[in-house]
Image (cartoon, rainbow, N blue to C red):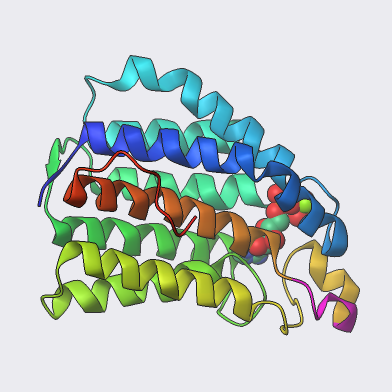
Amino acid sequence: MQFTVDHVIRFLERAAALIRDHSIELTELDALIGDADHGANLNRGFTAVLAKLDDLVDEDIGTVLDVTGRTLLSTVGGAAGPLYGTAFRRAGALLAGRRILESAELVAALEAALQGVVERGKVRQGEKTMLDAIAPGVETFRDAIAQGVLLEEAARQALAAVEQGMRATIPMQATKGRAAFLGPRSIGHQDPGATSAYYIACAMVGDVERLMTRSRDVSSAC
Ligand code: ADP
Ligand code: MG
């Protein structure tokens, strides 16, 4: 299975649609342990990305991801803008000039994105952030591909790991970001950033499913 610029652009369109459709939910989660802007922030950013996609169809994958990252950096604001922006830019830097990718390169790009979040956020797993959803997903996908699991199944396993990681933030106490100011009162709420990471992962996996099954349906999981 090979990935092209078209696949990346469709992923970004689907991510923008899912973030828009779940924007209120993300903001409501942020209202509980933050400042009630996560959905609005991300929706603004992905809407700005969407407006640029038509001009990017002839570019390489690295450029599309880099423009996406820079657009998120300049439009999302808050903590999530620099974090997602860095993630997309790191993946873009790794894939500079590439027009076709194999699964192994997709793994490498996801690992670069993950590393970007870790470094930019100065964050570890267990601190109740987007990393708690992203890291298990990337690790599960990497291990499945390394073991020769078929792409569609590897993607499904990864999405399940992201979802589990997202839910695992509920009992955690936040030690990074605004939620950390609440101390123990942050316990019992799902992290907004882990939730947006889940929807972005859904957009990625839904595309794989559609490719493999040639179905036009959005992933049933999301
Ligand atoms: P802000 O907190 O500045 O209002 P957002 O509401 O857009 O920004 O994003 C909040 C989310 O950002 C949190 O739910 C958390 O997942 C993530 N986050 C905050 N700080 C960090 C960090 N240092 N590392 C990783 N993720 C973080
Ligand atoms: Mg916020």
Give how far across and how far down residue 61 sits, in percent. Answer: 24, 36
Identify which residue is drawn at 47% across, 70% down.
162
Look at the picture and state if 109 lies above or below 12.
below
Look at the picture and state if 170 lies above or below 35.
below
Residue 113 at least partly seen: yes
Identify which residue is drawn at 56% across, 53% down.
83
Q: Indicate the quadrant where residue 129 lies.
A: bottom right
Please state the extent of the stretch shown in magenta in the rendering. Answer: 184-189
Q: Is residue 160 left or right of residue 179?
A: left
Look at the picture and state if 183 lies above or below 92.
below
Identify which residue is drawn at 49% across, 28% down.
49
**Between 167 and 116, the one nearer to me in the picture:** 167
Q: Indicate the quadrant where residue 32 lies.
A: bottom right
On whether residue 186 falls in the magenta region, the answer is yes
Give how far across and how far down residue 25 sits, in percent. Answer: 73, 51
Q: Is residue 64 left or right of residue 44?
A: left
Identify which residue is drawn at 59% across, 69% down.
122
Give the mark count. Answer: 0
Residue 135 at least partly seen: no
Give how far across and how far down residue 2 sits, in percent. Answer: 11, 47
On whether residue 197 falls in the magenta region, the answer is no
Q: Is residue 212 left or right of residue 28?
A: left
> Hey, which residue is sitting farthest top in the picture?
55
Q: Is residue 100 left or right of residue 184?
A: left
Q: Indicate the quadrant where residue 193 lies.
A: bottom right
**Between 130 and 79, the one nearer to me in the picture:** 130
Give how far across and how far down residue 84 sits, in percent. Answer: 53, 49
Look at the picture and state if 50 lies above or below 14.
above
